[in-house]
Amino acid sequence: MKIGNINSLLDSGVVTASAPCRIDFGGTLDISTFHYPLRHLDAATVNIALDARTTVTLHPLDDDRIRISSTGITQADFAPMAAPYDHPLGLMFAVADYFGARGVHIDIRSASPPKSGLGGSSVAAVALIGAFSKLLARMGGKGISKEQMVLVAHAIEQGVAGAPCGLQDHLAAAYGGVNRWHWPADPARPPFHRQRLLADGQCTDLDPHLLVAYLGVTHVSKDVNGTWIRRFIGGRDREQWHRIIRLTHRFADALTAFDLHTAADAMNRETAVRRAMTPQVIETMGDRLAASAMDMGCGARFTGAGGGGCLWAFGEAGAIASLRPVWQGLLSERPSARLIDCRVDSRGVM
């Protein structure tokens, strides 16, 4: 169903939707370049949704144009179907065009820093689709399921990016919680299978065991991901990816059993494998944070494709509590860096 001009649809009030960001383990395997040829090894990705949510609010405009404003990005305004999709807000304009929306101001507010490796653009796309789903319901149509939100957001983002994109960011945004995502790599089946590692009521049990830091340096995932993809296609690093799959499953199993030591060890081993392939996945500040985490018996891993963005630690509650002031001291040396105040979010898109 085409939405069209939304002025009259917002007579009863603006529409708002939000979705959580995520930290992850075993990322990149959610890209079909990897999980199709590696399907017999049961390629999987683990992510943990965080309550640093992205909120999208739809306001009416007096004309037919589409205006988008977003935290940390200059506001943009284009006629329907006229926005360049290589614009910093191009993905959002592409989503609006998919629904045929016009006469709308899309306001995006994120609790996580831009380009921080927490899945921000994908989260915003899912939240925007969630808002349009509410509009469709106001029009008497059928809302959009979470599975459909994921598939639509992923398809549009991959098309706009002009490069392979993974699914895990959209999945964490839509479903929330703590999950192991399996990639069946079977065209006759959905492209993902969800395995909950913790029930919704257990998710908060992880809060004292997590610490997330923004390194103060933005990342561009395609830089590192592009290197991994080129090397994989060229026949390089195959055994390393086999090891990453095994370590991802070890981490997931340990998380379910609340075996903190094994989970932290798997994190550090997986990070070491990736650093050996691409040393730039952790920059100088991240290297110091990771070293201090390991010194205290915690696991440390970059988020997304690394190269800046965020780093997260996992371990015993006492060790995490002791690590917090150490990380705060290190991060204070870079004005743009900081700890991110967040907890595990079981709710998904709302």
Image (cartoon, rainbow, N blue to C red):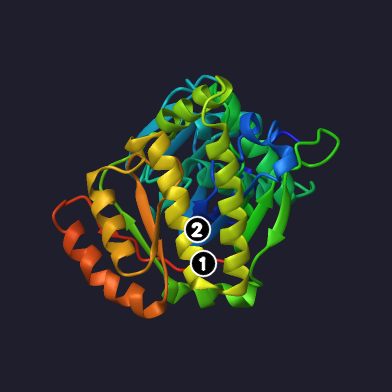
Marks 2 and 1, how far apart at CA: 6 Å
Residue 84 pos. (x, y %) = 47, 20
Residue 182 horizontal side relative to residue 28, left or right = right
Residue 198 horizontal side relative to residue 59, left or right = right
The quarter of the picture where residue 325 lies is bottom left
Residue furthest right in the image: 188
Q: Is residue 267 above or below residue 341?
A: above
**Residue linked to disc 2:** 266
The answer to whether any part of residue 350 appears in the image is no
Label drawn at residue 160: none
Q: Residues within 10 Å of mark 1 (few under 14, many from 20)?
A: some
Assess whether mark 1 and mark 2 are in contact (beta carbons under 8 angstroms): yes
Q: Amino acid at mark 2?
A: Ala
Residue 173 pos. (x, y %) = 57, 52
Q: Amino acid at mark 1?
A: Thr
**Residue linked to disc 1:** 262
Residue drawn at x 53%, y 38% is 240
Q: Is residue 228 above or below residue 51?
A: above
The answer to whether any part of residue 311 appears in the image is yes
Residue 254 pos. (x, y %) = 58, 67
Residue 234 pos. (x, y %) = 55, 19
